[in-house]
Amino acid sequence: MDLEQTIDKIKQVDAARADYPGEHLVVLGAGVLLLLAAGRSRSFLLRIIAGAAGGALIGRAASGTGGIAKLAGALQNGGLAWPRR
């Protein structure tokens, strides 16, 4: 099995599992913290690594069925069903 097949298999397993409540918010928070750490670091290498990892986590939080994509879809279709008094 080569690297491309391994990555495809991991993506299939990830797509098949159920989303945990708040999972994308936790990933978004971790990405923002990594970007903040990248901005404060004195090491060029650490800035590059933390910035890339933070950007990847923010992208991961924005994608997927339970993340920001779901919120954007709901807003595009007329908004969320807010409880009325």
Image (cartoon, rainbow, N blue to C red):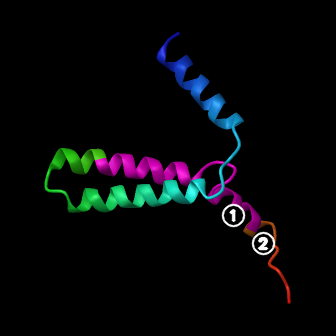
Relative to 16, say whether 85 is above or below.
Answer: below
Task: Kindly indicate whether the residue at mark 2 contacts the one at mark 1 (C-beta within 8 angstroms).
Answer: yes
- Number of numbered callouts drawn: 2
| Span shown in magenta | 50-74
Give amino acid for label 1. Leu
Q: Which residue appears farthest toward the top when viewing the image?
A: 1
Name the residue: 78% across, 72% down: 80
**Secondary element at image label 1:** helix
Whether 71 is drawn above or below 23: the answer is: below
In magenta segment, residue 23: no
Residue at 53% of width from left, 9% of height from top? 1
The residue closer to the viewer here, 78 or 34, is 34
Q: Quadrant of the C terminus?
A: bottom right
Residue beneath disc 2: 80
- Residue on which the image places disc 1: 71
Structural distance between the alpha carbons of marks 1 and 2: 8 Å
- Viewer-proximal residue, 75 or 9? 9
> Which secondary structure is most common in the magenta stretch?
helix
